[in-house]
């Protein structure tokens, strides 16, 4: 299968600082990839390379194009949300729709207006008169009305309350995503997108430390909650990370058959946030 995004040995440096360090991965059509990493890990730099906003070393192909050298062509099939504050505050909603209709060949004004009718947004309102939640609804309505093959979301729900965050991702799945489209999401609110993802990639210090389909995680990783007595036995199976919780040990294992840990405590599949901590802190240790 031809990858929608294909990276081979991609690196990007700023002076002596290596923001992205020899990264390789593939993202297929019809997937929702969660790109997870701490601040300064290289997420945004990597996304900028995918969007053609910065050049890089190595080989990077997006929709079969070189994103930096063929960005104009690429942008006809990509949508990007970083922060809703990027919408000009002086413009009226109707004027924004006018502008998009005139410049983007794949924007459907009819579709955008249908989506906006489900909200409390007035077409005569200026962006500065809308709440941040409404601006997010406006932004998502615009994006959903563009027939793009790839949607990139970089911390799209910063500053929104939990209701708007839930609605944002619900609308994204119901009104935008299908098997022909692909989404890349970065967020620090990992627990809110975990159930949306088909794939996850962890990045730290510019390097990929995990690249997996969500369905494969239960087969690869297991978390054990063990008493102090059983923890010593469990440690002989070389956990990648361990921590103390209420007088017990929580140990995370990679590539261990669950039967080997049977009887030592409570077993479960780690959630994405816990697995990220285990991989990043375990690697540092």
Image (cartoon, rainbow, N blue to C red):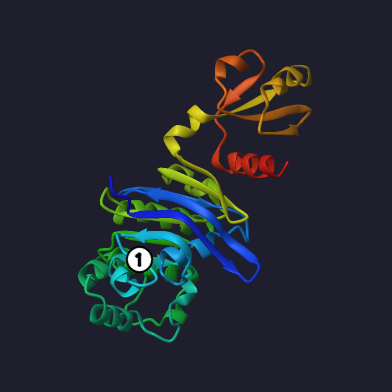
- Tell me the crowding category of disc 1: few under 14, some 14 to 19, or many 20 or more residues within 10 angstroms, Cα based: some
Q: Is residue 268 above or below residue 196?
A: above
Give whichever of 9, 231 is nearer the camera. Answer: 9
List x then y, in percent, for residue 48: 47, 67
243 vs 87, left or right, is right
Give whichever of 251, 138 is nearer the camera. Answer: 251
Q: Quadrant of the C terminus?
A: top right
List x then y, in percent, for residue 98: 26, 82
Q: How many marks?
A: 1
The residue depicted at 38 percent of the width and 54 percent of the height is 6
The residue depicted at 47 percent of the width and 71 percent of the height is 54
Q: Quadrant of the N terminus?
A: top left
Q: Is residue 153 above or below residue 200?
A: below
Q: Is residue 204 visible?
A: yes
Q: Is residue 160 visible?
A: no
Q: Is residue 199 above or below residue 15?
A: above
Q: Which residue is mark 1?
A: 66
Quadrant in the picture for residue 239: top right
List x then y, in percent, for residue 284: 70, 45
Q: Most extreme residue toward the top, as rendered?
A: 263
The residue depicted at 28 percent of the width and 67 percent of the height is 117
Q: Is residue 39 above or below residue 83?
A: above
The secondary structure type at the circle numbered 1 is loop
List x then y, in percent, for residue 230: 73, 17
Q: Most extreme residue toward the bottom, as rendered?
A: 90
């Amino acid at each position: 299968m031809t990858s929608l995004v294909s990276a081979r040995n991609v690196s990007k440096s700023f002076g002596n600082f290596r923001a992205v360090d020899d990264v390789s991965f593939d993202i297929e059509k019809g997937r929702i990839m969660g790109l997870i990493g701490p601040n300064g890990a290289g997420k945004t730099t990597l996304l900028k390379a995918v969007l053609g906003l910065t050049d890089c070393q190595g080989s990077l192909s997006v929709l079969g194009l070189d994103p930096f050298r063929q960005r104009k062509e690429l942008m006809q099939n990509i949508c990007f949300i970083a922060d809703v504050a990027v919408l000009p505050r002086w413009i009226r909603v109707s004027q924004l729709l006018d502008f998009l209709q005139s410049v983007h060949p794949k924007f459907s004004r009819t579709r955008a207006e249908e989506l906006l009718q489900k909200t409390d947004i007035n077409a005569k309102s200026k962006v500065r008169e809308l709440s941040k939640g409404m601006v997010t609804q406006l932004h998502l309505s615009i994006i959903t009305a563009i027939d793009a093959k790839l949607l990139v979301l970089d911390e799209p729900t910063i500053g929104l309350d939990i209701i708007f965050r839930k609605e944002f991702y619900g609308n994204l799945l119901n009104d935008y995503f299908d098997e022909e489209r692909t989404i890349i999401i970065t967020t620090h609110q990992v627990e809110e997108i975990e159930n949306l993802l088909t794939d996850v990639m962890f990045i730290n210090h510019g390097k990929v430390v995990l690249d997996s389909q969500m369905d494969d995680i239960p087969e690869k990783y297991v978390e054990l909650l063990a008493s102090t007595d059983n923890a010593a036995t469990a440690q002989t199976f070389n956990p990648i990370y361990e921590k103390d919780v209420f007088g017990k040990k929580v140990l995370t294992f990679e590539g261990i058959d669950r039967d080997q840990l049977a009887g030592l405590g409570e077993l479960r599949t780690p959630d994405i946030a816990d697995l990220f901590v285990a991989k990043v802190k375990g690697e540092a240790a």
